[in-house]
């Protein structure tokens, strides 16, 4: 047996952390992280299937290396092995990816939920790589409970007193309607927390012959009472072509 054969045997030895158990753990991490990534892909978020899958499998591989990759060094030096050192560096390093997904626009923070799912995917990958696949599976179920189940609950509670709603309006410009709408909201006990105005478009009313334009506005409101009476009154205003109401969208996604 030559030198190359002597080196090749330990390199590809399945008994030193490269056996069926380790490949199964990587496979479980691949499956669970793909499920989370697929959900974010369907929601068209900034980090989707590929990002979450790579984070989950990479974290699992780091844990495998941390647990099984330094056996030869320990045997030569006699120094104790500490697998938690690599795990701690994974937790610190994943923060750079999560931080890059968070941005602020008009005082609204966006990307927090996506960054949190990256963090969770890293954790479940570490759990699978560390020999705790059941905990990783439980964390995956918790993810779907939070991102799918919680919005259903909040939507049902959206229009109770004291909650936040979004008022969507389409109106003809140059009539001072926006100022009157804001005044009405204030009189009805609502606080306007955000105003988003969409670009003007030519009015479809032929009588105006292109002189009048329509604009859209989204008002974020906080109030102590239901917003339905407000919507009902605005529907009778001359110049307002469309009124809509929905639960306030979470800006942290």
Image (spheres, rainbow, N blue to C red):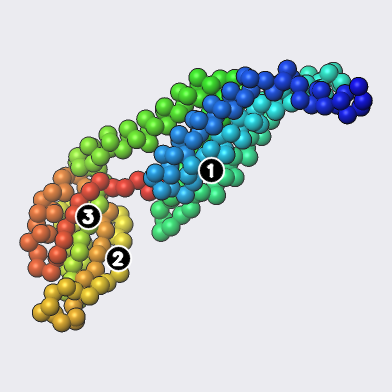
Check disc 1: other Cα within 10 Å, few if <14, some if 14-19, many if 20+.
Answer: some
Residue hosting label 3 = 167
Q: Residues within 10 Å of mark 3 (few under 14, many from 20)?
A: some
Up/down of 139 relative to 112, above or below: above
- Asked which secondary structure carries label 2, the reply is loop
Q: Position of residue 2 (x, y in %)?
A: 92, 25
Q: Which residue is disc 2 drawn over?
A: 198
Q: Secondary structure at mark 1?
A: helix
Q: Earlier in the sequence, mark 2 or mark 3?
A: 3
Label 1 sits on residue? 51
Taking 100 as reference, is 94 above or below it? above
Residue at (53, 38) in percent of width and height: 53
Please state if 177 lies on the left or on the right of 71 as rendered.
left
Q: CA distance from mark 2 to mark 1?
A: 32 Å
Residue that appears at 88% across and 23% down: 6
Q: Nearer the viewer, residue 202 or 22?
A: 22
Q: Give the Cα separation between the discs numbered 2 and 3.
A: 13 Å
Picture layout, residue 37 above or below residue 196: above
- Which badge, 1 or 3, comes first in the chain's sequence? 1
């Amino acid at each position: 047996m030559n030198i190359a054969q002597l080196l090749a045997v330990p390199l590809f030895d399945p008994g030193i952390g490269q056996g069926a158990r380790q490949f199964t753990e990587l496979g479980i991490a691949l499956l669970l992280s793909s499920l989370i990534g697929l959900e974010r892909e369907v929601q068209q978020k900034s980090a989707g299937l590929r990002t979450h899958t790579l984070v989950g499998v990479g974290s699992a591989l780091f844990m495998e290396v941390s647990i099984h990759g330094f056996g030869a060094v320990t045997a030569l030096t006699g120094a104790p092995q500490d697998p938690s050192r690599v795990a701690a560096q994974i937790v610190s390093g994943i923060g750079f990816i999560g931080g890059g997904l968070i941005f602020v626009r008009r005082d609204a923070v966006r990307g927090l939920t996506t960054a949190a799912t990256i963090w969770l995917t890293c954790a479940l990958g570490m759990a699978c790589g560390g020999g705790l696949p059941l905990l990783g599976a439980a964390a995956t179920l918790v993810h779907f409970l939070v991102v799918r189940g919680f919005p259903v609950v909040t939507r049902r509670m959206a229009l109770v007193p004291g909650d936040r709603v979004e008022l969507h309006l389409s109106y003809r410009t140059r009539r001072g309607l926006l100022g009157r709408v804001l005044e009405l909201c204030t009189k009805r006990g609502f606080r306007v927390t955000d105003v988003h105005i969409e670009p003007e478009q030519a009015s479809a009313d032929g009588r105006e012959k292109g002189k009048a334009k329509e604009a859209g506005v989204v008002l974020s409101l906080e109030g102590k009472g239901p917003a339905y009476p407000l919507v009902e009154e605005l529907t009778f205003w001359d110049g307002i072509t469309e009124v809509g109401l929905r639960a306030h969208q979470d800006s942290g996604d």
